Image: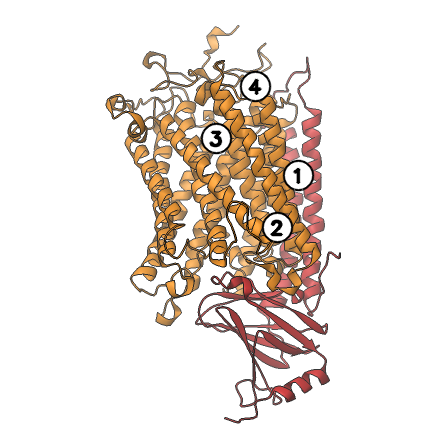
Amino acid sequence: MHFSIPEASSYAGSIDGLILLISVLAGACLLVAEVFFFWLIWRFRARDGVRTQYLDGTEPHIKKWISRPHTLILILDVVVIVAAIRVWVNVKQTLPPSDATVRVIGQQWGWVFQHPGADRQLDSADDVYTTDDLYVENLKTYHFQLQSRDVLHSFSVPVFRIKQDAVPGRTITGWFTPIKAGTFDIQCAEICGIGHGVMGGRIHVQDAAEHAAWIAGNTPTVTQ
Amino acid sequence: MATTTVDAHDGHAHAGPKGILGILWSTDHKVIAQLYLWTGMFMALIGGLMAYVFRMQLAFPGKPVPGFGVVSPVEYNALVTNHGTIMIFWVAMPVLIAAFGNFLIPLMIGADDMVFPRINRLSYQVFLLSALIILASLVVEGGGFGGAWTAYPPLSANPQYNLTPLGATLWIIAVALEFVAFLLGGINFIVTLMNARAPGMKAYDIPMVCWMIVLASILFMLSVGPLIAGAVMLLFDQTLGTGFFNPATGGDPILWQHLFWFFGHPEVYVVLLPAVGVTVDIVATFSRRKLFGYRLLLYTAIAIGVLSFFVWAHHQFIAGIDPRMANIFTITTLLISIPVIEMFFVVFATMYGGSIRFTVPMLWALSFLAEFMIGGMTGIYLGSSGADIYLHDTYFVLAHFHYTFFPIAIIGGFAAFTYWFPKMYGKMLDERLGKIHFWGTIVSFNFIFIPLFINGGLGDHRRIFNHQNFPELNTPVFNTLREVATIALVVMLLFQLVFFWNLIKSFRSSAPAPKNPWESNTLEWTADSPPPHGNWPPDQMPVVYRGPYEYGHPDRESDFWPQNVPPAREA
């Protein structure tokens, strides 16, 4: 049993790092709060002859115990906001130059993938079409053009930490760079009807030679 | 300001029809409160049993579920969709806002009834109709709607895609009617609190739970408009063939998401605020402490309400909105943590220096705080755009919002129910059975959702009917944790039998509850248990002399000081 999944894209580590940062900062606050809370329950349990203190929360020397922790929370919020936006801008808001582009089309209930052929150009005669299996080359930066033919779907590759909804009528462009060879899950992450639970695909991250061989072996012979 | 007497008690209810019709046509706020309460509890039972069926399918895929049979994908989607819809709109809202709002507001502010008793009656009648429609939608031809409680189009808008033409239409009609019911009820709460308070009760003498229910009603009224419009558009798309959400005819599916979440996020605070109000009142009473920072808490609640209108798109980070927009919503979302934490500080400070009595309602109130903190903290992950890319639509999200909604609706509901039960029915609940029920529910709750946090963190997606179709999700770790969660759910449902046994036992006992069993200060405890029609004899309507939280006052021998006791009588 292992409690982690591979980090198979160039930015997976940064997303995991952000999650770790939040776990440490927010987790520490939660721990302190829960311990303090249970201490309060124990310390001020009803006992014979002990009378309640009468404070109404307007005295400044008492109020500071509320305002000071707030400053700390605000600082931590800012740290998390900065870290979150940095990751977001890198993954979603910028588009690094690509080595190739693939088209990902969601439909009820499967994935259609359009790969560029040997010419590395999409929408040319040697494009390779597949259903439910996406083949990419390791360590190359890909742009994906995400489309849907019917309802909302979501293109999710957990090992890449990438997820993007597919919206009918739009083409949404994103990117990834695989850093680990192997075969991984593609899961539809947005409910898309009764077949949502079977809408799985696989992504095959291949070495350069392997990928070239795959393209050569699957390029359509009939030219259009 | 507060001296106006509103004659809501016009006597017509006595002359109305008897029996079940008499109850349905009653304008007495306490009768309407109980109708909402028991309807809500019945719906909670339905929602809980739905969870049982789909959790069994998730833990033991393909095997027949005892009492249900083999679950089909259509049934699975309908169950998860309607579990969510019912628990939020037909359980959390009727129990926390409608039932306790109706019962408590007139009693706590010293009024004989709501200002608009007939609107109040209409509110419940529309609500009952909506509940019947949502239940009917589950059994019509084609099955219940299965497009998730968020009902994103085009799936929800087009019968060709969702394959449930009747179920989807009835679903949206039921939801829209439920909104109508709560708009009617909300108007009543707001006007009653403004106009019908007992002589002497100033704005800062109002018990916090009344404030919170009224703030929630205002929040609901301000946020629900766009969604009612959206619901009508969706209904037209489904039935008339319009294309508001259809890209092929120039519509936009993401428009619905904005309309939905513009309401959907404030809705979280619509149900949170009443639960906080209940918790605060119970914690102050059983800590025997004056509420720390009354005004601070009230202003904080208002700040949360205002901020909650500016965070909605954190549900849509990866939905295809302009990625630059995510940055703004990350900032607003994380900033809402400040007023929410402020609320907790206020409650902690109230406990500090107190003398805490561990009654059953107090245990529920304390567990609300302990559990909601986990729900709030895990929200930081999802409000942070960068982390949400990975965690969105996983079981992590699901566990997060169950750690908020379960404390709100179920824990908050039980806290309020066990606290005000003696006033509602004039009987006491058994403390020992109450504690067994409490511990059984709380421990099993954590055993349901902590495993799901882990699964979600490992990438397990929600709403997938059978994980065996995904190699990465069909591992021993995932499957073991799914089984733990499911078994814990069954245990939790079984512990509810203790609650029902406690109710039966209490109803059958002959010992009457004292007028003020918890030694509380607020006005409802000065009425008889249960209060008669009109709440107090007309010549003995209460007059208020002080705030609701005067516990442990140094000048007094007794550690509480009811709001209606004239100062002169004290030595």
Mark 4 = which residue?
B551
Q: Give the letter of the orange chain.
A: B
Colour treatment of the image: by chain
Which is nearer the N-term, disc 4 or disc 2?
Answer: 2
Q: Colour of chain A?
A: red
Label annotation for residue B380:
2
Q: Amino acid at mark 4?
A: Tyr
Q: Amino acid at mark 1?
A: Arg
Label annotation for residue B209:
3
Residue B286 shows in this picture = yes
Q: Residue at x 48, y 61 (%)?
A: A194
Badge 1: residue crowd in 10 Å (few <14, some 14–19, many ≥20): few
Badge 3: residue crowd in 10 Å (few <14, some 14–19, many ≥20): many
Q: Residue at x 72, y 50 (%)?
A: A24
Q: In this orientation, which residue lies closer to the viewer: A56 or B418?
A: B418
Distance between the alpha carbons at the discs numbered 2 and 1: 21 Å
> Which circle, 4 or 1, is nearer the viewer?
4
> Which circle, 4 or 2, is nearer the viewer?
2
Mark 1 = which residue?
A68
> Which circle, 2 or 1, is nearer the viewer?
2
Distance between the alpha carbons at the discs numbered 4 and 2: 36 Å
Q: Is residue A94 left or right of residue B233?
A: right
Label annotation for residue B567:
none
Badge 4: residue crowd in 10 Å (few <14, some 14–19, many ≥20): many
Residues tagged 3 and 1 counted as in contact (Cβ below 8 A) = no
Q: Give the total number of marks visible in the rendering.
A: 4
Residue B80 at what x, y percent from top left?
50, 51
Q: Indicate the quadrant where residue A87 lies.
A: bottom right
Distance between the alpha carbons at the discs numbered 4 and 1: 27 Å
Instruction: Tell me the SS state at disc 2.
Output: helix
Instruction: Tell me the SS state at disc 3.
Output: helix
